[in-house]
Amino acid sequence: MKDLLEYIGIEPGRVNFSWVSAAEGEKFAKVVTDVVKEVKTLGPAKRLVKR
Amino acid sequence: MENIENSIREVAEKLLSEKKVDLIIGYERGTLPLRTTPCFVDKVEDVQKLVWNASCDANLSKYVVGRKEKVGVVAKGCDARLIAVCAVEKQFPRENVVIMGVPCLGVIDRKKIEAKLEGKEVLEAVVEDEQIKVKGESFELVLPKNDFLCDSCLTCKHRNPPIHDVLVGEKVPEITEANEFAEVSSLESKSVEERWKHFEEELSKCIRCYACRNVCPLCYCKMCFVDQSMPAWFGKTNDLSDTMIYHIVRAFHVAGRCVDCGACSRACPMDINLRELMKKTEKIMKERYGYEAGLSLEEVPPLGEFKMEDPQEFIK
Amino acid sequence: MVFTLKWKVIEKSKLPILIGELADEYEVFAPVKKKSIVSFERISAGNEAYLGFRNTKKSPKEIFFPQTETLFTYKASKKDVELAESPTVKGKRVVLAVRPCDARSFVLLDKFLSSGEHEDVYYLEKRKNTAIVGLACNHPLSTCFCTSLGGSPFGKEGMDLLLQDINDKYLIETVTERGEKLIEKFPWLKDAEKPDIEKAKKLSEDAETAMRSKVSVDGVSEKLDEMFDDPFWDQICQKCLNCGVCTFLCPTCCCFDILDEEGKRVRIWDSCQFSCFTLQGSGHNPRPSGKERMRQRIMHKFNYFVKNYGENFCVGCGRCVQECPVNLDIREVVGAISTRKGE
């Protein structure tokens, strides 16, 4: 999925995968923070937005 | 070619008269030059309609899915692989289908010929050995067949149907030298922005006629995601973002199952190069899982199961 | 009509100038070539128009009946729903180089979309504001069969002006008053001479003779009356994939679906071949399989429309024949019906 989206031109960094169990609260918080940071750097998604 | 045609008719006659099948699905002559059309034969006397030539481009495995009766299907390498995929996916009882495998040297891409003729219409065509002889209102040309085969055929690694019940014709040598992923690799080497622009441009031609979906034997869902309305996954208008989502999702749905038969690109009335997108899914499957679809009736496709050793480097 | 039939000529090299001048005052649509596909698009410069085509891939119906069209917008609040009309086309438009079959299709669509209790104002408004400049066919394709359906490669139905390619020039024939008014904007155009008109006449005769495809539609509508439950449809529909290519490229197909999307009520092209076409809210579908849908297509074109409007709903452009992915040839289907023995 990640490969295919990157191939079509969705910036890498917008699609992220992580194994997080319900018991791993701290890891979950970290993953979300990291992804949010990464996506914020990429800016608003302009691709695949309806005209 | 003629030998194969006669063999197909003989095999078909035998299967029908011995009541091993109720129906033969093959090709018959089309109404236009360089065309054949799917043919459904249930009477022995009609087997003479069946033909075999380099214009047998339709993917007949499309007509097998969902059938309850016993059928014999004329199948090229790609078609036979798709029958295998659909059989593994339990779309019909495997024992109901007699795969009449035909070793194939490639089908002609009419769009390439149209491009060469620049608007001139072919009124008559004869394909002899390695040549295509075309005649029109004010021209006569001899074209080297190999220059006008479908791109999917030029890099085909399974010209001999891997799974078949009957092999109709002598096996042909497989292509070993061509890089089937050359087009994909070339796109991969471009930047993310360039790729996006490229796909935007290509897919902006799409008129959402769904020929690509309807011609694909793998698209057999009774309710396609396109038509779902509660919830609606995306819009049905030809807004570019909706169109791109349609193609991306369809690519994802056929990932791990697509064999690059090329039917989608051939069917597209707007000449969109859909293979560029679908082929990438094949490359991912080969590189990640060492998997090619349609070569086995026992193997569970990688996207249908999870193994501990599946590559996970992208998961944080 | 109170105008005199006028013929003018324009050298091929000067046509882009005329188109350029037109584009200053009108919204101009013309065939444009992009890689292998020629389709109608809005142009702003004369040299963007491409006239070296046999017929365009898509029919020009989308100029009057866009694939996606906003009907109105809405804003819902707790108490109320505010509706706002969608802007209609106000400016004057010209469509260039429409083949006679496609121009004729506008006449059929006019009949269809102006009938009944509610006229299709979206379509008709655009039609009112648009002049049609046709391009006669010197070389019909082998898949063209307009003459079988009341048309002609040099037909003028639905046009305001007709261009005819007479080698190094185009002959311009005035067909309607609107066409006359349009041509008066170009006083620099030379009058046609007798040899020009004779040449055009000869080319038109040759084109009619060259029409290879003849489809007999006589008695087809009557035969179809008796055929609704006939096993004929089981045979015919076997290879049909029920995609939408034939209906989308067809100049007279105009079925549409209506959706609400984010504050807009839009209509989009629909196809009798799609599985949701007559899917009802209850879940029942009176056309559940490809067989009923293929029957619908043929009946609509060659029976229902004939009964309602006196004509076949097909102009013989041949696009469906060319583009069907499995070479399901409508000429063969109609031919098979017409040669059936009557009951």
Image (spheres, rainbow, N blue to C red):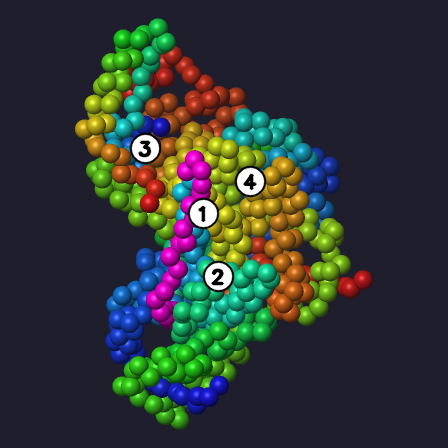
- From the image, tell me which residue sits under label 4: B62
Tag 1, which secondary structure? strand
Q: Residue lying farthest right?
A: C343
Badge 1 local density, few (<14 within 10 Å), some, or many (20+)? some
Badge 4 local density, few (<14 within 10 Å), some, or many (20+)? many
Tag 3, which secondary structure? helix
Tag 4, which secondary structure? helix
Q: Residue at x 65, y 39 (%)?
A: C284
The alpha-carbon separation of the residues under discs 4 and 2 comes to: 42 Å
The alpha-carbon separation of the residues under discs 2 and 1 comes to: 15 Å
Instruction: Decide which of A20, B100 is in the foreground and name it.
Output: A20
Q: Is residue C164 left or right of residue C143?
A: left
The alpha-carbon separation of the residues under discs 1 and 4 comes to: 36 Å
- From the image, tell me which residue sits under label 3: A5
- From the image, tell me which residue sits under label 2: C121
Q: Which residues are magenta?
A: C77-97
Q: Position of residue A42 (x, y in %)?
A: 21, 31
The residue type indicated by label 1 comes to: Arg
The alpha-carbon separation of the residues under discs 3 and 2 comes to: 42 Å
Residue B119 part of the magenta segment: no
